Image (tube, helix red, strand yellow):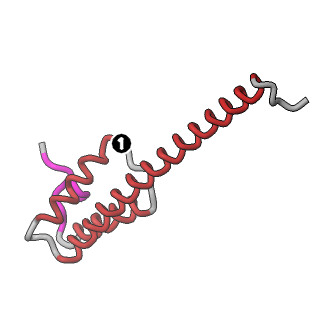
């Protein structure tokens, strides 16, 4: 059984590696939909490119940019989750204050 040609996981044709790496970087930077099943292998392959002394400087740079883009997306997702939780907590606190105010007779007539 032979390996697939091209792509970040296959046997790269000469000059093809940098194009694939740049495409992966662009996909991450522009937030293209990337199937969950290939996310981990993609990042692992990008790390391999960065660490491989045989990789060209351009390919290493593109792979590093792709890894940074993925890290940025992760941080943005974490920040959005934190903001959503804070918003939900504030809504709950306001509702509790309104209930407390109404139970104390401070409600509006």
Report the span colored magenta: 2-13
Question: In this orientation, does residue 5 appear?
Answer: no
Going by the image, does 85 lie left or right of 11?
Answer: right
Q: Quadrant of the C terminus?
A: top right
Left or right of 101, for residue 44: left
Is residue 107 at least partly visible in the picture? yes
As drawn, is 17 to the left or to the right of 94? left
Quarter of the image with the N terminus in it: top left
Q: Quadrant of residue 37?
A: top left
Residue at which label 1 appears: 36
Picture quadrant where residue 91 is located: top right
Is 100 covered by the magenta stretch?
Answer: no
Name above or below for residue 104 compared with residue 59: above
In this orientation, which residue lies closer to the viewer: 63 or 76?
76
Looking at the image, the residue that sits furthest to the right is 109
Q: Within 10 angstroms of label 1, few (less than 14), some, or many (20 or more) residues?
A: few
Q: Position of residue 14 (x, y in %)?
A: 17, 71
The structure residue drawn at horizontal position 15% and vertical position 49%, both measured from the top left corner, is: 3
Give the total number of marks visible in the rendering: 1
Q: Main secondary structure of the magenta part?
A: loop
Q: Nearer the viewer, residue 18 or 69?
A: 69
Residue depicted at 24% across the width and 68% down the height: 16
Q: Farthest residue in the bottom direction?
A: 57
Residue at image coords 62%, 35%: 93
Identify the residue at horizontal 22%, vertical 59% (top origin): 46
Towards the viewer: 15 or 81 = 81
Q: Position of residue 50 (x, y in %)?
A: 17, 65
Please state the horizontal and vertical placement of residue 51, each as a whole percent of the image. Answer: 12, 64
Helix, strand or loop under label 1 = helix
Direction top: furthest residue: 103
- Residue 11 in magenta stretch: yes
């Amino acid at each position: 059984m032979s390996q697939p040609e091209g792509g970040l996981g296959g046997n790269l044709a000469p000059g093809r590696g940098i194009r694939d790496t740049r495409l992966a970087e662009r996909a991450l930077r522009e937030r293209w939909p990337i199937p969950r099943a290939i996310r981990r292998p993609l990042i692992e392959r990008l790390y391999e490119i960065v660490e491989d002394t045989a990789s060209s400087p351009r390919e290493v740079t593109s792979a590093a940019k792709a890894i940074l883009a993925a890290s940025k997306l992760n941080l943005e997702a974490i920040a959005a989750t934190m903001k959503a939780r804070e918003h939900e907590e504030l809504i709950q606190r306001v509702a509790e204050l309104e209930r407390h105010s109404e139970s104390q007779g401070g409600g509006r007539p």
